[in-house]
Amino acid sequence: MALLALAAWGALGPSAAHGQDADTLYLTLDESIRLAEGGNPAYRQAENTGSLNAVESRATWLGQLLPRARLTLFNTAFTGNLRRRSVDFYGNPVENPNAEWVYFSTTSQGLNLSWTFQGRSLFDAHERLSLDNLGRDLGRDVALRGLRVDVQRRYLDALEQAELMRAEEERIEARRLDLEVAVRLHSLAMRTRVDVLNAELAVEQQVLAHRRQEAAYAQALLALRTVMGLEGPTPVALAEEPLPLFDPAGLDVERLVVRAAEANPALRRSTVEVRQAGLALSEQRNGWWPEVTMGFNIGRRAQGPSDGALFDMSFDEDLDQNFFLQLSLPVLDGFFDRRRNEQRAAVELENRREADRESRLQVEETVRSAHLELGNQWETLRLAERSHEIAGEALRLAREEYRLGTRTFEDLREAFEQEAETRRQVITARHAFVDALLDLEEAVGERVRPEVEPPGPGG
């Protein structure tokens, strides 16, 4: 049903088709990308991960970078002591002559501020936060770029299959016209019954080819629906999009390599990984620095015999406050473990630098290879266009000669097959050029096509 609706839409235009089937979802390329951004599961996962940046930033600032604050609003206790032993004037333990239970109560409130750091730990914690947030943002950006390229590929592939399907439909009509000519010539005793049967067979084979192309188009639409995250049985029809066909001779491959070094998502991720490895080494070296702990306490404490201070919330008590500073030297604490961990971090940093260099070499190779392939596809398209013009003229002349009786049906079928094959080659070459362009843009990390696209071969 969706295929019939699309065929009607392709023949009558979007407005007419829309009037015939109001349930069909008509999509342009931009609308498909917009729907994919809201429905693709992989991209939504990347977005969900990126939403952690705000809460992670607050947790790091309040938990590591800024002093930790602890407020005790209410702490009350009732305590009883029984001391059977005491000490004499010289500090020797003796039996307590007044061994009896002593009861007292306390109620306190207080505020504690503490701050601990070691070497560059505060700066490293801030750098770790920035890199983690950057990594999540980069993951979301990579997912978005990949999704947009994937939607374009699926969308244009569906358009290619639709164009091939329409070409097969046109060939059905051409085959039927040839059948009518064969029947008419047979009635005039200018052709045998064999020619008529061959013409009927050609019609049936063309119908079969059209059915296969319909199935290919349906599969292309299904792939597009999947990457867009569409659910439900709503039929989908696609608007015709102009293909970005242009002469790639104006693209400077050296400039593309420079742009890729800055914009390619894989290189950006590799740069972040190198910075993370350097940060890990810095964090290991912090273990050789003294650990500094400082804090400030302020509070009030009510005490009284028995239960006199129990639940005492009055503020007439004196305030207690103190400031403390502690310095710890981890000289002999895990010396060899720290040396091993530091050496491992240094090796990992060097490996990440080499991996980054390898990634840059691979991206440069990919960009140059994609640029060459784009030029090859452009030349292939030009040759395919020229071949189709020649085959079309040859088919026109072959039909005229067949009607005049100077050419056999086998000769006509051969010319017909050549024209059909060159037409398929043109369609395939046009979309192969676009695929090569998407490969190049994916390798560079941004659009490289001209803003105003000149017409390609064949207009």
Image: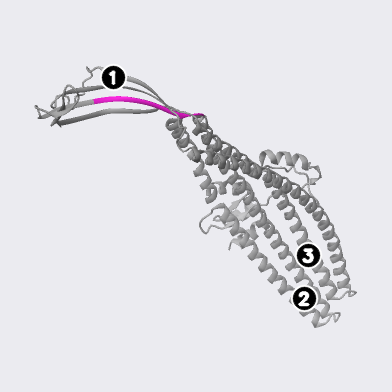
The mark closer to the camera, 1 or 2, is 1
- The location of residue 145, given as percent across then percent down, is 62, 45
Residue 168 seen in the figure: yes
What amino acid is found at the position of numbered circle 2 in the picture? Ala
Q: Is residue 118 magenta?
A: yes
What amino acid is found at the position of numbered circle 1 in the picture? Asp
Is tag 1's residue or tag 2's residue first in the polypeptide sequence? 2
Give the quadrant of the N terminus: bottom right
Q: Residues within 10 Å of mark 3 (few under 14, many from 20)?
A: some
- The location of residue 116, given as percent across then percent down, is 43, 29
Q: Secondary structure at mark 2?
A: helix
> Can you identify the residue that label 3 sits on?
421
Q: Which residues are magenta?
A: 108-119
- The location of residue 106, given as percent across then percent down, is 20, 26
> Can you identify the residue that label 2 sits on?
199
> Can you identify the residue that label 1 sits on?
320
Q: Secondary structure at mark 3?
A: helix
The mark closer to the camera, 2 or 3, is 3
* Foreground residue among 162 and 49: 49
* Foreground residue among 401 and 46: 46
| Residue at 85% from the left image edge and 69% from the top image edge | 399
